Image (cartoon, rainbow, N blue to C red):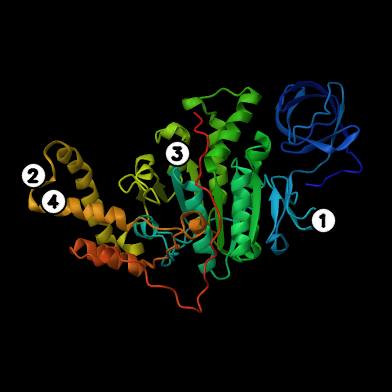
Amino acid sequence: MNKKIAQPGNSVGVIVSLKGLVVEVDVLGEEPEEKELLTVEGYPDVFLEVNFFRPGKVVCLNLTNSQVLRCGQKVFRSRQKVTVPVGPDTLGHVYDALGTPLDDTSLTVKNRKSVTDAMGTKSYRGTEKMELLETGLKVIDFLTPFVKGRKIGVVGGAGVGKTVLTMEMIHNVTQGSKGAVSVYSGVGERIREGNELYETLKETGVLKNTVMFFGQMDSTPTMRSMVAPAAATAAEYFRDEEGKDVLFFVDNIYRHIQALTELSTNLGLTPSEGGYSPEVFANLRRLQNRLSSSEHGTITSVQAVFIPADDLTDPAVQSISQQLDSVLVLSRDIAAQGIRPAVDLLKTTSSLLTPKIVGERHYKLADRVMSIMQKYDSLKNIIAIVGENELSPADRADYQNAQKLITFFSQDFFVSEHLTGRKGEYYSLEQTLSGVEAILAGKSEGAQKPPPKAENETKPAATATSTEKADNKK
């Protein structure tokens, strides 16, 4: 979006009502288009975005919460919409939802695209063999295979490790994806976390192939609601115009819904189930549809999902989960035991865990593991009453194997080396499958550490980060 429009367009009317971020304009002249930016007389750097129309009036949103607006001020058309910079020149830089650079204010990128208009390229899901992307994280590669062009969600409440796990995936996946570009969208999270991620990507050399967009928790709901579509615009351009495979990370997609809900309340829209406006879920669907593959390239997305009040049945969480191919659920009870990542193995699901995608060996191992974990969950209550010694030999063996699997799937992260003092671990898929097979066969080798990397391999940098402790808002 241009900082200033030198020559305002035709007059629209005058401001007649101000309510928070909502500005109502009496249409006395030319009617603007939906999502068009309007300028205010005497303040060419203040923009109002057209949201919807009423008879004789247009309802707008004050994008930056400017305090100079007054009733009676004249409003003009700009014939422009919010645009963000796109293309190779944006890599290595950080922008806000309006496309303003945050790391280098002198940066100018001529190529810009509208945030509200999708590229329009028909998406598809190829019929050829799907390509698995290795994350180096045992529990993800084993239970929620990371497939190019698909979506994976990291779901959990406050303080269970969503942000740290997402950062670890960015660290591992981007270093192993040659030729791919990464787009990161930070929605409603802490400034500290964004700065830590920026420094992590910079130190590991990943930033040069990454473009970042932030609308953090101190931003207005309008800015927070626009940052994910802004990042999607950048991702679409790399996919369709540059023919790139794109890794798209968003933390946190629930905050996108939360921002849309705040705007719906300000606009006076009637809420439905769970207090969410139907328009919120329509907007979510449009965003998710943009994060798809086309004949030119792919967009593979990782989306952190906050659970309000630890309620997995929340309508927003359910709506998000339905649009993901894999859902990795983090548990507060497991996190309290000091296990990282704190994955609930039974609640974690993936539609991609099929013999056709992962192979017969992997699929059968996953099926056996899930059966043992289901049995383990049932046996816990019995053991609490009669003790483990009263179990049959077969049940006792399954119970002990389940405990070994829980320990095996825990892992130290590269991005938290500075805090824990323990070296990060990277497991190949073959090492993970072999470890699971060893445990199921009753061997102790399953829990062994991965072999050290050769000296000529890239060593991940130890970087300070913090475990997410977001406010548990209802």
- Residue type at mark 3: give it: Gly
Q: How far across and how far down the image is residue 95, in percent?
A: 70, 51
Callout 2: SS: helix
- Residue beneath disc 4: 396
Residue 232 in view, yes or no: no
Sequence order check: which comes first, mark 3 or mark 4? 3
Alpha carbon distance from label 3 to label 4: 33 Å
Sequence order check: which comes first, mark 3 or mark 2? 3
Instruction: Give left or right: position of 60 versus 415.
Output: right
Residues 54 and 453: in front is: 453
Alpha carbon distance from label 2 to label 4: 9 Å
Instruction: Check disc 4: other Cα within 10 Å, few if <14, some if 14-19, many if 20+.
Output: some
- Residue type at mark 1: give it: Ser
Sequence order check: which comes first, mark 1 or mark 3? 1
Alpha carbon distance from label 1 to label 2: 72 Å
Sequence order check: which comes first, mark 2 or mark 4? 2
Alpha carbon distance from label 4 to label 1: 66 Å
- Residue type at mark 2: give it: Glu
- Residue beneath disc 1: 106
Where 152 falls versus 34 (above or below)?
below
Give the number of the mark in front: 3 or 2.
2
Residues 358 and 201: in front is: 201
Q: How far across and how far down the image is residue 423, in percent?
A: 45, 63
Q: How far across and how far down the image is residue 144, in percent?
A: 38, 55
Instruction: Check disc 1: other Cα within 10 Å, few if <14, some if 14-19, many if 20+.
Output: few
Instruction: Give left or right: position of 2 versus 228.
Output: right
Where 61 falls versus 463 (above or below)?
above
